[in-house]
Image (cartoon, rainbow, N blue to C red):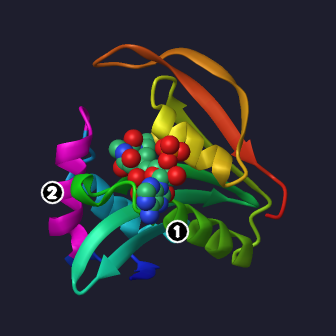
Amino acid sequence: MILREMMPEDLEQVMEIEERLFSHPWTREGFFTFLMKSNAMFLVVEEKGQILGYCGCLLVLDEGDITNVAVKKERQEEGIGSFMIDGLIRFCRERGVTLLHLEVRKGNQKAIRLYERNGFKMDGYRKNYYTDPSEDAVLMSRTEGI
Ligand SMILES: CC(C)(COP(=O)(O)OP(=O)(O)OC[C@H]1O[C@@H](n2cnc3c(N)ncnc32)[C@H](O)[C@@H]1OP(=O)(O)O)[C@@H](O)C(=O)NCCC(=O)NCCS
């Protein structure tokens, strides 16, 4: 299992995972646009040519905004999410990032626990941030060791 930068050739597999997991999936064009940005960092976890998960963030000065985190449904709860977030933090550190932040659905306890295990702390809430279904966002960030 390796962690590497996402390439346009990965998008077919990435889209399969994305469309199964999210009520408002990103489009292929959306991912492609981000991959072309010099301040975006998108990573995939790959095993024998299969994409198992991916994550991405946008870097602005010394801050990173995590925009995507996903692990293929049938490969969740094997530690891939943690492996990926740990790697993303490392890559960000190498690019000079000192603050990482993200939003997550308040009811997505699995993701919140994943971020907490990886050093993120809750900063607050954003009321009714999400739609389908409508839900508050939890705002989280990590500064230590970044
Ligand atoms: C959130 C998400 C990325 C987590 O990925 P994951 O690969 O399942 O994460 P991990 O395996 O590292 O951790 C998940 C759980 O499995 C457990 N686990 C990890 N390795 C394990 C193993 N080898 N055996 C058994 N359990 C294990 C972890 O302890 C953790 O338990 P917890 O939820 O009770 O704390 C994944 O569930 C997902 O893609 N969800 C849908 C998309 C999503 O919500 N993305 C986040 C948007 S902000």
Check disc 2 and report its element: helix, strand or loop.
helix
The answer to whether residue 44 is seen in the rendering is yes
Give me the residue at 29% from left, 64% from top.
32
Query: Is 51 on the left or on the right of 101, as rendered?
Result: left
Return the x and y of residue 135 as percentages of the image width and height. 43, 16
| Quadrant of the frame with the C terminus | bottom right
Give me the residue at 65% from left, 66% from top.
89
* Mark 2, residue position: 16
**Would you say the beta carbon of the disc 1 residue lies within 8 angstroms of ligand 1?**
yes
| Spatial separation of the CA atoms under disc 2 and disc 1 | 21 Å
Residue 21, quarter of the rendered image = top left
What amino acid type is highlighted by mark number 1?
Phe
- Residue furthest out toward the right: 144
Vertically, is 136 above or below 31? above
| Quadrant of the frame with the N terminus | bottom left
Return the x and y of residue 121 as percentages of the image width and height. 74, 39
Neighbourhood count class around disc 1 (C-alpha, 10 Å): few under 14, some 14–19, many 20 upward: some
Span of residues in magenta: 10-24
* Mark 1, residue position: 83
Give me the residue at 58% from left, 41% from top.
113
Was residue 43 drawn as part of the magenta stretch in this picture? no
Was residue 13 drawn as part of the magenta stretch in this picture? yes
Q: Is 5 in front, or is 122? A: 122
Q: Is 73 in front, or is 136? A: 73
Return the x and y of residue 43 as percentages of the image width and height. 44, 71
